[in-house]
Image: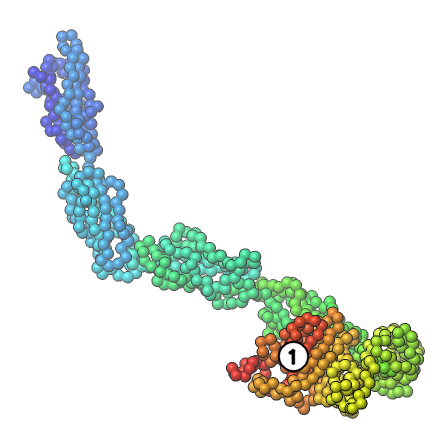
Amino acid sequence: MANVITVPDRSITIGETQRIAFDFENIDAMDVTGGNNSLKECLQLDYSHANGRIKDYSWHWTFGRWTGEFNANQGVESTGNYIRFVRAASGSVPAMDVISQTFDIDTKRPTIVGTTTIDAPSLTRAGQVTTITFTFHERITNFSLEDLAIQQPDRGTLENLRSTDDGRTWKVDLRAPANLAANTEVKDIRITIDMAGINDIPGNAGAVRSGGTEYHTLITYNIDTKPPSATIAVTPNPVTNNNDRLVTVIITFDEEVTGFTADNIDLSNANVGTRPGAGRTETLVRAIDGRRAYSITYTAAADTEDATNTISLRNLNTIRDAAGNVATVNPTSNNFEIDTRAPTVTIAMDKERLTAGETATVTFTFSETVTGFSDASIVVDGANGTLGNLRQDTADGRIWRGTFTPTASLSNTRSQISVNYEGIRDRHGNGNSGPSVARSYTVDTAVFAIISATVNGRQLVLQYSDETALDPEQTHNAPNDAFVVLVDGVRNNVTGVLVDAAAKTITLTLDSAVTRGQQVSVAYNDPSTGDDPQAVQEAGTGNDAASFAAKPATNVTPPPPPPAPDTSNASNAPDAPDSDRDGVPNDQEDQATGLLRPDGSAGMAGDGNGDGIKDSQQAAVSSTRSQTLVAGSQDGKLIPDSNARISKMEHSAAPATMPKGMEMPVGLTSFTVSLAEGRSTESFSLYADPALGATGYWIKDSAGTWVNLASEPYGGKVASEGGRTRLDFQIQDGGQYDVDGQVNGSITTPGAVAKMPLSIVGQAPQADTHGFWY
């Protein structure tokens, strides 16, 4: 017979065994059952292509053939398997090499391979449909929707199960509930598959059931109709200069988002500033927790005090969560305070000028309550005095006051006081540096201080300070030879000494007249060492004035007048005498009303500023019957060595259009003044009849607005002196009130002595009233 290995079932699946038969020649029962010829020795089987083997002790000899039970390996999918029998020749028994019939093995259950995908992992609207795709490692049968299940009720339905190829790749549609509510968020909803209900083509089931259905998770999905939300936290609070004005903003979303950038941050109510030297502040966004939290840093604006700052978001439609939901609620940060403004101080004094025996109250008003302010903070270098009794105004806390005592024996000295900001802090620690704006004032505590000396022809006038009370008794006067006057270095004898106690002047009459251009000096020698009547004395005390060394006298002697014309010498004639060349003839200036003396008596006619010298003889003083202008003025008197010269002073009609309520009783008063070399700003005083009711010297600024230069905001003031109204003001060469607009040593100004009702001064008028008033 032939040598054959027979395989009864050519396809082996899970759980199946095969009894394979061996029909060989020359092999009988004795060959394999006893002695040295055991089965293992007689049957030399090769399983290298069998994917399994015959179990030991499963052999049976029946009716002349051997059979053995073959167990296939598990988890195998293989075709063309076989068993081979090999025996070497022995004696008379020939060699044998037999191969069995081929057979297929499929002991692997169907499984899902690769990645199961879902087109939309999150369902965001009612009835939304998305597709799930998954692949088995082999073709399957007996697969239906009943093998799939959603593990949370009412979270969706599965439909349209289909294969896209020969039964390996499958798709199923997932539909969101029809009544899906807003703001619903359910995570990780499981879709399971019952693998036990699925078979491969050979019939292997996907899983073995043991007492129930075998569920395996196919995929999870989310239901998310809730838009992303965020919180915004800002630190520090408050933001100050102590932390370099840096503001840190943390925006935290309740879930990961996309589309969020710096453009979504609304800093419009956050006082964004610039970093010194770096220009615009950058608003960089850095994710600090995936895509949920972001950090933003910016620099707050300098010099800012704002207690209500917030940060929010904008352009919300660009911000979406992973499900595609758009942010709808705009968060607002905590309110935070920004204080990057250092405290400042304003200094005021109740006196502009301090004389002997006087004190002044100095008021320090801070922009906010401060700490660290004390006596040591006050800069008195250049103050010409001392400050004491510094105390805080308990009603406000920002205001401090002290008592200033001026230094004695100073003559008309410009002084100032300021505050050193070092160590002064506001409640948030902000501080300034350097000195504050200084408050200026005049200390004039010297008795017998000469503030000017002028000579005109044979008259040399010594003007003493306001502190001087000259003894008016002529018998208590200094002798002529106590004064030494030199003209171009040659002594010019004094022939008379006249004291005017009210005007605080001593007029020396010279032996010979001084001519224009000559250099003149004057000195005084007290005739005796003690106090006696034959000297310049103080009224009431009998104290002698101290001697003084030679000092220059301003020569205001006019040039010789031109020859008189044959026709007329009237004041309105072109060639009328004008000794001081100010454009106003002498006889007009001589009509100026003199200031009343302290006793109420009339002053000298033609002396409109009460300095004891006729205005027609002074180049810096010009008068008409109604007004007197003083250039280079301090409280209406000439500043020594100012050397200002008035070249023109004239009146013209008031303009046709004026602000509502303004009155110009004498029209416009224009003048031109030449300044001494090196001076850029000049001080002026303008005397007017109080009956005019003038409230200031008004002039248009560069914007066409009428302003009052004789008001405090412009450094001026309105005073009453000797029965006249005095308007004090300042004008800068080339400034907006100098009509030529050039720095050329000359000031020309067309202004007006005018009045404005106090009820409207400083208020904005209606549109047709031509400007504001101050």
Query: Which residue is at the front of the view, 394 or 709?
Result: 709
**Residue at 41% across, 56% down:** 261
Q: How is the image coloured?
A: rainbow
Q: Which corner quadrant of the image does residue 376 belong to?
A: bottom right
**Residue at 19% across, 38% down:** 138
**Residue 116 in view:** yes
**Residue at 66% across, 86% down:** 652
Task: Determine whether, in the image, residue 181 is placed left or right of residue 479.
Answer: left
Percent of width and height locating residue 714: 64, 76
Residue at the far front: name it: 566
**Residue at 52% across, 62% down:** 273
Query: For mark 1, what is the residue?
Result: 709
Percent of width and height locating residue 752: 65, 83
Q: Which corner quadrant of the image does residue 590 belong to?
A: bottom right
Q: Amino acid at mark 1?
A: Leu
Task: Determine whether, in the image, residue 761 is placed left or right of residue 440.
Answer: left
Percent of width and height locating residue 743: 68, 71
Query: Which residue is at the front of the view, 358 or 259?
Result: 259
Task: Determine whether, in the image, residue 487 is placed left or right of residue 319.
Answer: right
Query: Which residue is at the front of the view, 450 or 116?
Result: 450
